[in-house]
Image: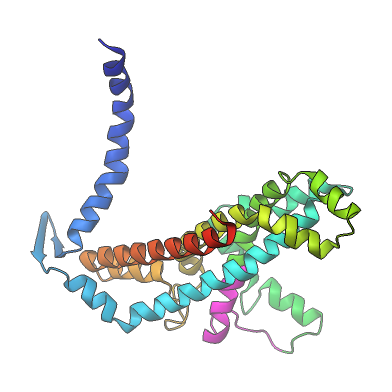
Amino acid sequence: MSRRTLGYLLVLPAGLVIGAVLIYPIVYSAYISFFEMFIGPGTLHLIPVGFKNYIDTIRSPQWWGAFARTAYFVLYDILVGMSLGLGIAILLNREFRLRGVARALILFPYVLPSIVRALMWKWISNSDYGFLNGLLFQLGLIDNYIPWLSDPRLAIHMLILINIWEGTPFAILMYLAALQTIPKELYEASEVDGATSFQMFTKITFPLILPTTFLLVVMKTIATFKVFDLVYALTGGGPGESTQVISHLIYTTTFGSLQFGKGAAMSYILLFIILLLVILYSKLFGGEAGW
């Protein structure tokens, strides 16, 4: 047996597993997106409908409403979450006592399982006995308990706040790693030349962490467009449709209304939109960094 054949045999089990759990579902979901699927006891009927599922999705106000809410999530996560992450990372990159403890504590939300985080915030924001209302009431900041998750105007912002709380530690971790790769000699030389802190940030720090910023923007866009567990556990998409995001709409269409073909079409439209955004980011950051 040649070394090449032996190599193929050794990677064959891994290839079969990847094909079964990754490639087959992707291909099959693309296939059923062109059908209406009817499932009964021991039966499965597929009726070809062409691009109907895609056209119905694009024409659906409910789809675009969910897309706008998800884009709102993404915007906050990128602008607020990443700015917060960079600021905290700069502070944690300085020398001070108990820096290791501070770094460990700041990562606490990131290491908790997502469903635990969601249930914890469900208790904290409970309108009758939640910790948040109790604290604000004790401090005299509110006169009555606030229905954080049952008021349509507040629920979406409460979810955005929790999502930022969950996602910011990852941005801190990435920026902290990027900051530690910047040679200290650059700051020392610029200090000798009389540069201010703002000039050092704009001329040294920001350009050198730009690749990390690009990576974070892409990863946060993908992750936030997929946000599901938080919405499912805290509001279920309500009240009304005020917190229904794309992933929750796909879930309810697929497993609530049993429209498997339409749910698959929605997933591929979302994939196409995210792909366009990543290409746009690449053009923007590539032009800025001269890649």
> Does residue 28 show up magenta in the picture?
no
Question: Considering depth in this image, is 82 or 38 the residue closer to the camera?
Answer: 82
Q: Position of residue 70 (x, y in %)?
A: 46, 73
Q: Position of residue 137 (x, y in %)?
A: 76, 82
How many labels sit on residues?
A: 0
Question: Considering depth in this image, is 220 or 119 the residue closer to the camera?
Answer: 220
The quadrant in which residue 63 appears is bottom left
Q: Would residue 228 be found to the left or right of residue 59 on screen?
A: right
Which residues make up the magenta segment? Answer: 144-162
Q: Would residue 82 be found to the left or right of residue 90 on screen?
A: left
**Up-down relation of residue 199 to residue 185 (above or below):** below
Question: Considering depth in this image, is 135 or 154 the residue closer to the camera?
Answer: 154
Q: Position of residue 73 (x, y in %)?
A: 52, 72
The quadrant in which residue 273 appears is bottom left
| Residue sitting at x 89%, y 48% | 97
Q: Position of residue 62 (x, y in %)?
A: 34, 81
Q: Quadrant of the N terminus?
A: top left
| Residue sitting at x 66%, y 75% | 129
